[in-house]
Amino acid sequence: MVYWLLKPIGIMVLYFLYKIKMVGQKRIPNGPFIIAANHQSFFDPIILSGMFKRPIHFLAKNELFKLPFLNWLLRQLHAIPVDRKSGVVIRPVRHSLKVIGRGECFGIFPEGKRCKIGETIQPKKGVAFLSRKSSVPILPVSIVWGNKTLKRTPVTIVIGNPINPDHFPNTSNNALSQLVMDQIKDLTEKETARINASEDNERTPRYER
């Protein structure tokens, strides 16, 4: 109930702060799936939750749940606490699998942390493990941030083709997670190139004949 009350407000705030565009909505599966996205900003999960019609359950670091009000709010927003320092992930993994098993949408950032533009790290194998364990596709999603000096920062969400784990029976979880990350990187690079080309065209002087 709280989620559906806050979502319209959140969407209005997002559109006030950012110029958001979504590409590839037709690739979103009808059934349960796992969103795998790159992670640069604190607002990434908020933007994804606002732009996707269905609620998304995200993993969030345990430290955010220490304050009583924030703990209540995050749980109402379908956040799942995970203690990254202890390395104990049995409880959040079980919770995540239950969410997916109910046919709901689950979101994860394979890099495991916010990364700077151009930073490359080995993705965690969790996205592949959860996908195989639940037998649902992985939806690669790229969040491309534009010029942050503008009044409304452009943000483009690019949705790739779903990846079915059953098509990679002989691939390790690490390799499958890397494949997912490579797909996200490819989406990011193509959209960034398109944006740069568009900006170059706008800067090119036009001469009247």
Image: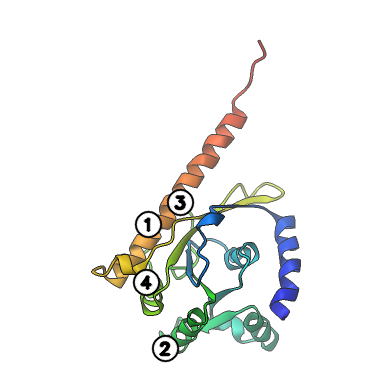
Any mark on residue 187, and which?
A: 3
Quarter holding the N terminus is bottom right
Q: Alpha-carbon distance for marks 3 and 4?
A: 19 Å
Residue at the farthest front position: 30
Q: Alpha-carbon distance for marks 3 and 1?
A: 9 Å
- Image quarter for residue 122? bottom left
Say what amino acid the circle numbered 4 marks: Ala
Q: Earlier in the sequence, mark 4 or mark 2?
A: 2
Q: Earlier in the sequence, mark 1 or mark 2?
A: 2
Q: Which residue is mark 2?
A: 90
Left or right: residue 71 compared with residue 107? right
Say what amino acid the circle numbered 3 marks: Leu
Any mark on residue 137, and which?
A: none
User: Residue 114, relative to residue 208: is it above or below?
Assistant: below
Label 1's element?
Answer: helix
In front here: 132 or 72? Answer: 132
Q: Which residue is mark 1?
A: 182
Mark 1–mark 4 contact, CB under 8 Å? Answer: no
Label 2's element?
Answer: helix
> What residue is rendered at 45% in x and 71% in y?
112
Please count the marks in the image: 4
Say what amino acid the circle numbered 1 marks: Asp
Neighbours of disc 4 within 10 Å: few (<14), some (14-19), many (20+)? many
Q: Is residue 202 visible?
A: yes
Q: Alpha-carbon distance for marks 3 and 2?
A: 32 Å
Q: Which residue is mark 4?
A: 128
Residue at the farthest left position: 170
Mark 3–mark 2 contact, CB under 8 Å? Answer: no
Q: Alpha-carbon distance for marks 4 and 2?
A: 16 Å
